[in-house]
Structure formats: structure tokens, C-alpha cells
Image (tube, rainbow, N blue to C red):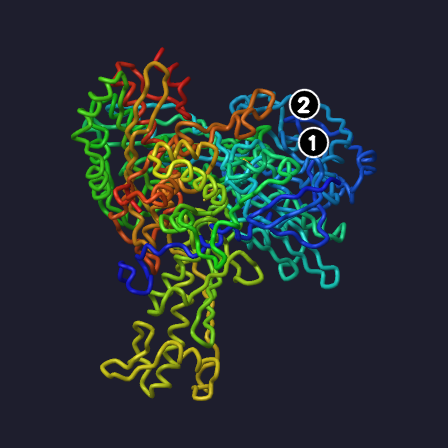
Amino acid sequence: MPQVSMTVNGKSATGEVEGRTLLSTFLRENLNLTGTHIGCDTSQCGACTVHVDGKQVKSCTMLALEAEGAEIATIEGQAAEDGTLNAIQQAFQDHHGLQCGFCTPGMVMAAASLLKENPKPSEAEVRHHLEGNLCRCTGYHNIVKAIMAASGQDVSAIAAE
Amino acid sequence: MPKDGGPNGGIGASTTRREDVRFLSGTGNYTDDINIRGQAYVHFLRSDVAHGRLNKVDTSEAAKMPGVVRIFTGADFEGIGGLPCGWCVTDKHGQPMQEPAHPVLAQGKVRHVGDPIAAVVAETPEQARDAAEMIELDIEELPAVIDMKAALEDGAPKVHDDLTSNLCYDWGFVEENKDAVAKAFDEAAHVTTLELRNQRLVANPMEPRVAIGDFNRATGDHTLYTTSQNPHVIRLLMGAFVLGIPEHKLRVVAPDVGGGFGTKIFHYAEEAFCTFAAKAVNRPVKWTSSRSEAFISDAHGRDHVTTIQLALDKDNNFTALRTDTHANMGAYLSTFAPSVPTWLHGTLMAGNYKTPLIYVNVKAVFTNTVPVDAYRGAGRPEATFQLERVIDKAARELGVDPVELRRQNFITEFPYATPVAVEYDTGDYHGTMDVLESMIDRAGFDARRKESEARGKLRGLGVNCYIEACGIAPSNLVGQLGARAGLYESATVRVNATGGIVVMTGSHSHGQGHETTFPQVIAEMIGIDASMVEIEHGDTDKAPMGMGTYGSRSIAVGGSAMVRAAEKVINKAKKIAAHLLEASEADIELADGQFSVAGTDKAVAWGDVCLAAYVPHNYPLEEIEPGLEETAFYDPANFTYPSGAYACEVEVDPDTGKVEILSFAAADDFGNIINPMIVDGQVHGGIGQGIGQALLESCVYDEDGQLLSASYMDYAMPRASDVPFYAVDHSSQTPCTHNPLGVKGCGEAGAIGSPPAIVNAVVDALRSGGHDIYHVDMPVSPSRVWAAMQG
Ligand code: FES
Ligand code: FES
């Protein structure tokens, strides 16, 4: 089986994969980074969202071999070494932006890439950016609110908690 | 009990969720995250035809494929129990429903696309899949029945050859009222009739189902890890009825579960298979559903076709209600399927109104489709939708205000015994409607409508009410109604020697936040910090036998069990404290984590009493045992009856038929509330799913039984840009009178209450544009709206 090497959350990672192995599978099964979730098989749910060379990518849309030499960031690398949540993660907790948590890693990674490009997104821009990330639990209300709060905007006027 | 949360994060505090930390850092433990050393993987070969005779399943070539461990077919399961149905409905003639066998792997026939035929166990998931493609099938395709009414026609192909027809049951409720209802219709001043469909949906929790079977040959112990809302129920059903494994040799673990919404209540073939196969191949066996597989193997929801009629007198009082529903069961009876269109639907037809006479007829029908069972709300959304739609239509026919027509007919006195066999304990429907009206600025609607019209858009306002029966359920009552299970809940409160507490609950969290809210209750009761309390759930080896989480029952039933167990702990701790303080037990008070003697300054701390219980040197050993751990089982005396009033404003584009939701407001009465933030979140999520049903989602079969909406390409899930921010208010609170917390449950309200508000709003918008329309079926898609506008 071919070998693949990449950097994941700042550490080098190597593994043997089949040609058909997806990046999402490689992260979960070879590297045991099970925070990246698989919610569909048509690349539409976004639960598997990671960053590849700084860009937001659904890791089920990429073969592991295509990530040769790439810098990958996953949900496991978002908090500080001591476990302190980053600003986006903390906003999700503060604003109840998650329930079952299954979509959450993808949502956090998508939010991180949005805020990098657009530090103060409007509600419509947040909603538009989440086009490829499905959540079945929250009705999106608190996810959108959390992302806006993470960008430093005042969300106290948004209805309810 | 105080409702401000207090300093300890007690009842009423919007405490942030402790479980979030692991979910946010990617360290949750979902079933697919579990890998057991030596595990093999199973791939199910599923039927791609809706109905067929299985002439041959030849696995000989497949068995030679690399990595194959063993291939199983229906023959391996001959003589093994099929999947049981947990509820037997009695029809209107007093006869039990028709109940077909439901084999783990197909025997002789396949009955829906997705019916599992064979299972390949191999070293890797890819090898299992590759080998499955080499299985040779000889299936003689038979004509399929998809449409319910066609399925009931004489000469229709039968889904099950050994049943007399495709009719599962014909249920009349209350059958004795039927003639009186007919008479009331004869005498009515006005009758409104509405035909509608409550379309088939797929629950779609974002985590697909997973099962891992494990078997210890040395001890004979089985373990099943599964994505379940109720691991004990799975243990009982699978152990006792399918595989014949006694409960003490079977452990079922449902770890972090990524959403359920009903579809993870049921016992599925894949769970039984993995448990069985782990022993047969002497290796752990893992199955992970793909999303495509989920669409054809997870139980679906809804799928009712209904005609409802409302009779009114000359003063617009409701005098009678009659409804006639065909409910799709699919090809087999899923675990609780028969109860959904009957006892979870017919009993709710009174809604918030004092209609004196009601008759509900339901024909449950077998078709060559995926089985249908409970999905968020289960029966109650179907009841609410038809009732609130027919009231809206009546108001429009009569030219009266839809809110006033509702108010005029509200039940105002409690307890209230409905004509459909349930008794509402509390509610304040005018008060809740007042809250809603204060949220939506009805007076300003006309101006908003003009503003929309100026932009060429049609604006509509829809309002509706709902009532639901939650906190299921009194066991003796549901037993009489055909349930084959009790519906109590359990909890063990284990106090450790240094005062920390672990609560083992039979409830299960798959997003609801029990790990945060349950400790809030204990913190409140004892006056300690919530961080001193941990919740264990989801493992049958830890928690006492419990019934799990569905039907908005966790806090109302599971929370009550926990309160009862905590009360026992506190009573015992008071005895210990009395001994330590050399006082009479009757004088001991517990507040802020201190036991004190009333009227004195003598006190002993919670932690010291706990330590005394486990280091019983100075201890009344002749009167009480050491230790501090109690278990309680709580069986509710009644259902709880959350209620609410919802409003939605939409804009319809008359050129395209596209509906946009501009605002959504929900006023709910959930009784007392433990954590307002989490309650809001539950309502948001329910509304999100309700918007999905009203505007987007539809599970569609073609006439041959092929599922056309079998992936996220074809099944339109609501996305962030399809929904607005929601306004949610639960300040209207009439506490439940029969459980210790006065709570009613909030998990399903949003999904129950929102679809009619949206469709009412769309009809309102279209009528404002001069279209003589009273109804548009869900999903209210642009093409449907556009077609309706063309007449
Ligand atoms: S798993 Fe990658 S988009 Fe769904
Ligand atoms: S939190 Fe459950 S899917 Fe988003």
C-alpha cells in the first residue's frame, strides 16, 4: 500500500493507505483523530470539515494521498495545549451553539475559516458561509449567534438565549 | 423551589453545558469512535427492489474474496426470533392488529428497498463491501404497493402473504362516540372539511447509526455498543425476543449519541446481527451506516393522509370533530410504530379546545416502503397540523379572526377531561396566547404587509396553538392500551464518602444536556455546587433498568426518579446528621449543604455526614446501614401537557412561489424550567425541523418503490440560510401538578407547533394576493405554491 505523509495539527503524520482511502478516513482510522466526523457519503453535511493548507475543506472530498505534504488542521488542534478552548469554541459553549455535538467540529472549523477571511461577518454572511454544514439539533440559531459573538459583535439583541 | 438558579447553578440557572468541552475539542466518544482490537466489519447487501421473491442467494464466489471472514444469509437466522413490535393496537372490532414477522435478514421475500438480504463480515469495511458485490442474487420481482389507498384495494399485492390483507388495523376512537359525532355534524351550522397529507420524513440525526457486537468466549458475556436513545430497551428486546440472551449476560452501551429524534429508539436488525455475529465469528463485529444506507434502513416518520372535519354551531363554537387517517406502517412494524397514529395521535385531537365530541379513525397500512415509526413529536405533530389547519380554514370560511376563533373555544378550566381519554392537569391557553401576541406586533402587520406589497411580495401571518402529551407514561394505562413495556424511569444516586455524587439515570442524552441539567436539580435539593454531581447514562451495566429518552420524558420522568432517589438519600442523611448532632431527626433541616438543628446554631456539613456514612465509627449502626446510595423507580401518574402558541410571518414571491420565513415566534408553557438556555435550544431545534417539514423535506417513492430522495442531494435538509432567528418565550408557566419538579418537557414542542403556523402564514399570504386557496400540502415548495396560484 502506498505511504502518505502530512503535518496534522503541527505534528508530522505518516501512514499506509489504499488509493481510495479518503482524508477523513485517514484522520479517523489511521491517526485516531475521531473528532472529524462522517455524516454523509455525498459531501454535503460538512461534519468532516478540516483545514488543508489554511483552506476549509470537507475531508471526505479528498483522497488521503492528495494531502501528501499538506498542513492539516483538525478540531483536535483548536484548543490550547492545556485544553483552554479558543474564542470560537468558547463562544459555542457560551451561546449553546451545540447539542449532540456531531456537527460541531465541522461548524467550528468552518467558522474559523470564515472569521479569518471576514472578521466581522453579518448574520446573512454567517448563514451563507454555513451552506455546506448541516446541523439537525440547533435550528442554527445559536450557531449563528455564537459565530457572531466570537467575532466580537454584540449579540445581546438577538432573541432568546 | 426557587427558579433563579441560586449561587450553586441550581434550578433555573442558564448554566453552560459541561459536555460541550469534549464535543468542542473533538474528544467525544461516539459509537463509531470505538474500535475494539481484532474487530471485523460487516457490510449488508440490501434489496434494490421493493418487493420480490428471493429464489437464490449464492455466496460462493463472494466467500472467496480477499479478507472475507464469513457471509451470513437469512438461512443463518432461521429459528431465531425476529424483531419484536413493542405495542399491540386493538382494532375497532376488538381484534389485535395484524403483526407480521420481521426477520433479521430477509427470509424468502424482500419487502422494501433496503431490506437486508446478506451480511458480509470481513477484515476491512472495503473488503466487506467488495465481497458483497460478488454475491449472486436471483430475485423474482413482484408488483409493489406504495400508495396506501391502493394497498387496501381488493386484489392489491400483499406485502405479507400470510396476512389477510395490507391492513394492519382499523382503529376507531372513541368508537362509542361515533354516532353522537355524526349527529352533531348533521346539526352543525357550519362544517369545514380539509384533506391533507402529513408527508413522510426522514429523521436524519447527523450521526448515522453504528453497532458493534463483542463477545467474551471465556465468560459468555455479550456487549453491544450502539447509537441508541434507550440502551435498556434494546437489551430487553434483543436479549429476550431476538437472540435469547439473558440480561445478565448482555450489556448494551450507548455512548455519546449524535442526535436521535426518535429514529434511534427502535431495535434494528443491524444491532441483533452484530451481537449474533460477534459470537459466531468469535470477533468483535462493527457496522457503520453510510448516509445512503440510513435513508433506506432508519425508520422514517409521519406519512399520514387525512380528511378532517370540524363542526361549529351558529356562534362559532366547536361542536364536533371527525378525522379519518391512513397511516403508513411501511413493510414491517418498527418497534413502536402502531402506537404513533393511535395513542400518540388520537388522544391529542382535542388540542387546546373544548370540542365536546370527537371521533378518530385510523387505518394503518402495510406498503413496500421502509418502516415508519416515531419521529420528533410522533403522532402529535400529525394531530396538531390537521387540527390547527382545519381551524384556520374554518376561520377563513367564516370570515372571523383565526386567533379569536381559537380563543373563543379554548379550554379554560383545569383539570380538563377531553373526550379522547386524557385529562389535562394544567394550562393557561389565553395567557400563553397573550404572551405570543405581545411578541409579534399584530397591530403593525397591515403596515408590514403593505410594505411587502410595495416590493411585489405577498406577506402572510400564521398563528396556531398546540398541546402535546409528554412525560410518557403511566405504565398501567399504557399497558391497557397495548404497550408491551412499562414506561417508568429509574435513577441511582450514589454519594461518595467525601460528598461527591454520581447519578446513574435510565434517561439518555443524545444532545439534550442531561449532564448539565440533572446536576442542577441535585445541587438545588442539597445546596451543594452542581460541579459536585456527575451523571452516568447509556450503559446497562451502570444504570438501573430504565426506559430511555423520547417523548420529552427525560426531566419529567427521569428527573422525577432522580428526585425520588435523592429524597431517599437526604432522608437517610438526616438520620445520620441527627445522630451526629445528638438531635431528633424531626428537627434536622438541610440548606446550603449544611444539616442544622432547627432553631439552634448546631450544624454538620454535607461532606461530614457522607464521610460518617462510609466510615461509620460514630454511627447508629443498630438503626441504619452504612453507605449512602439509593435507587428509585418513578412511574408517572399522568402524561404532562405542555402547550403553546406559535406565529410565523412569511413572504411569498408571486413570480416564483418561493416562501421566505421572515420571523418566527414561540410562546410555550413547559411548566417549571431547569435550564432556560437549554430549553430555548430545544425549541430552536424543534422549530428548525418544523421549518424543514413545512418548506423543504419530503421522502418520495416512485410507483415501483424506489426511494427518490435517498441522499442529501435529493432530500432537502434545512440549512442555516433557510431559517431566521427565532423569538422564544417560556414565561407562561403552569407547573405540572403530578411530578415533583412541576416540569412538563420541551423536546418536541418546536417540531409539533411550527408546521401549521408556517402553512397558515403561506395561505394567509396567498389569499391576500386574491388567490382563493385554503391549503397547500407540505413541503410548501415553490412549485407547489406556484401551481396553487395558477389554480
Ligand atoms: S462527511 Fe464530508 S461532507 Fe458529509
Ligand atoms: S448539534 Fe447535533 S447536529 Fe448540530
Closer to the camera in the image, B252 or B34: B34
Q: Report whether mark 2 lies on the same chain as mark 1.
A: yes
Q: How many marks overall?
A: 2
The yes-or-no answer for disc 2 within 8 Å of ligand 1 is no
Q: Position of residue B620 (x, y in %)?
A: 43, 86
Q: Residue at x 44, y 80 (%)?
A: B611
Q: Residue furthest top?
A: B790
Check residue B620 in the rendering and tell me which mark sits there, or answer none: none
Residue B101 in sight here: no
Q: Residue furthest front?
A: A69
Question: Image height check: is B171 above or below B249?
Answer: above
Q: With B57 as the anchor, is A41 left or right in this view?
A: left
Q: Position of residue B740 (x, y in %)?
A: 34, 60
Q: Residue at x 27, y 58 (%)?
A: B3
- What is the chain identity of the residue bearing mark 2? B
- What is the chain identity of the residue bearing mark 1? B
Secondary structure category for the residue under label 1: strand
Secondary structure category for the residue under label 2: loop
Residue matched to label 2: B142
Classed neighbour count for the residue bearing mark 2: other residues with Cα under 10 Å, few (<14), some (14–19), many (≥20): some
| Image quarter in which the C terminus of chain B is found | top left
Amino acid type of the residue that numbered disc 2 sits on in the rendered structure: Leu
In which quadrant of the rendered view does residue B647 lie? top left
Q: Residue at x 46, y 41 (%)?
A: A107
Classed neighbour count for the residue bearing mark 1: other residues with Cα under 10 Å, few (<14), some (14–19), many (≥20): many
* Marks 2 and 1 close (CB-CB < 8 Å): yes
Q: In the rendered structure, which disc, 2 or 1, sits on the residue that comes first in sequence? A: 1
Q: Position of residue A129 (x, y in %)?
A: 42, 33
Check residue B109 in the rendering and tell me which mark sits there, or answer none: 1
Q: With B24 as the anchor, is B358 left or right in this view?
A: left
Q: CA distance from mark 2 to mark 1?
A: 10 Å
Amino acid type of the residue that numbered disc 1 sits on in the rendered structure: Lys
